[in-house]
Image (tube, grey):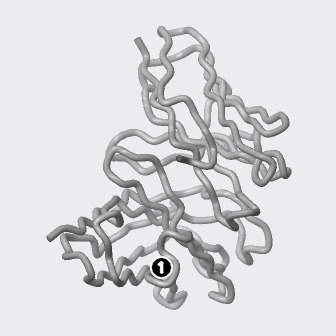
Amino acid sequence: EVQLLESGGGLIQPGGSLRLSCTASGFIFSNFAMAWVRQAPGKGLEWVSIISGNSNRAFYADSVKGRFTISRDNSKNTLLLQMDSLRVEDTAVYYCAKDVQQWLIDPYYFDYWGLGTLVTVSS
Amino acid sequence: QSVLTQPPSVSGAPGQRVTISCTGSDSNIGAGYNVHWYQHLPGAAPKLLIYDNKNRPSGVPDRFSGSKSGTSASLAITGLQAEDEADYYCQSYDSSLRAWVFGGGTKLTVL
């Protein structure tokens, strides 16, 4: 059974940094690209970032480019999101999602998601 | 402000059929990128409902179906059940933005 468990959320002041983690199980982690998707309070889903199975390719939404860094540790089945220069508008539940492909040659979809971790950016 | 446009809400009585539209443009759906649909219940993980425009993952009832034409796609739900009450999102890829994009979401209410 595929399981994705996010952690690392919390309350942080504007301008601060936070690192989110997603621990995966139930599949060969290195064989699949992984993504972060967020949902601000009362809003819809917003794609944040995605990384290929071997970390060779990574893409970011314009709203976080230059501030967020996605990475993964395949030896620990863990996906990471380093969030720097946080803004109030980054407040959201952050979901980890598994892609159906490995290399990110073409865009596909997300077949499994975690329950999310809440990040609140406020002074 | 979403790249893909969905109606904010739809409703229907138990047993009825509802459809949710997802309208894009020539840089996403119209460019040939596939459309996928997710069901999201409050406090739960989003669930893949339809992939590649019309395909259902194992375990998704055949009451759910998807279609795509031109720059738009649709999700149809027949035989509405109380458990279908949730938020539904379409997703595709936009070549101009170079981004995976979602619709704004549609809240389905079962009357």
Q: Position of residue B2 (x, y in %)?
A: 56, 47
Which residue is at the far front?
B1
| Residue sitting nearer the eye, A120 or A50 | A120
Residue B65 shown left or right of residue B88 in the figure: right
Vertical comparison of B3 with A58: above or below = above
Residue A65 shown left or right of residue B36 in the figure: left
Q: Quadrant of residue A110?
A: bottom right
Residue at the spot 75% in from the left edge and 52% down from the top edge: B28
**CA neighbours of label 1 inside 10 A, class few (<14), some (14 to 19), many (20+):** many
Residue at the spot 24% in from the left edge and 76% down from the top edge: A14
Q: Which residue is mark 1?
A: A79
| Residue sitting nearer the eye, A31 or B24 | B24
Q: Position of residue A55 (x, y in %)?
A: 62, 87
Q: Chain of mark 1?
A: A
Give the secondary structure at mark 1: strand
Which residue is at the far left?
A123
